[in-house]
Amino acid sequence: MAYLYIADSARLVSKQADRYIFRTERPKLQALGPFDKQGRWVGDEDALWSTEVTPVVSLTLQLSGLEDATVQS
């Protein structure tokens, strides 16, 4: 997840994320400061895509096999 802010806000969000988000989940959040105080884009567009994204396992795959575990009455 990427949050786009002004630089001051991005630093605060990152600091709080470091404090409150579990270490294995923290890399999933990016707080970037590509906006200036007037709301104009001044950031590097490539920074949005700089980290490797891990694919999400589909719900169907996660639930496969559950039908075999249901109790037949």
Image: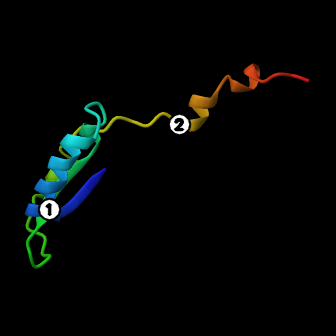
Count of number-bearing discs: 2
Locate residue 9, reporting x and y percent.
14, 62
Estimate the x, y position of residue 45 in percent, counting from the top left.
Answer: 15, 58
Amino acid found under the numbered disc labelled 1: Ser
Considering only vertical position in the picture, is 28 above or below 68?
below
**In this rendering, position of residue 14 left or right of residue 55:** left
Query: Is the C terminus in the top left, top right, bottom left or bottom right quadrant?
Result: top right
Question: Circle 2 sits on which residue?
Answer: 58
The residue under the point 19% across, 41% down is 18
Q: Name the residue: 12% across, 75% down.
A: 40
The x, y position of residue 11, in whole percent, is 11, 54
**Callout 1: few (<14), some (14-19), or many (20+) C-alpha neighbours within 10 Å?**
some
Q: What colouring does the structure picture have?
A: rainbow
Q: Helix, strand or loop at disc 2?
A: loop
- Which kind of residue does numbered mark 2 sit on? Ser
Q: Residue furthest bottom?
A: 38
Q: CA distance from mark 2 to mark 1?
A: 33 Å
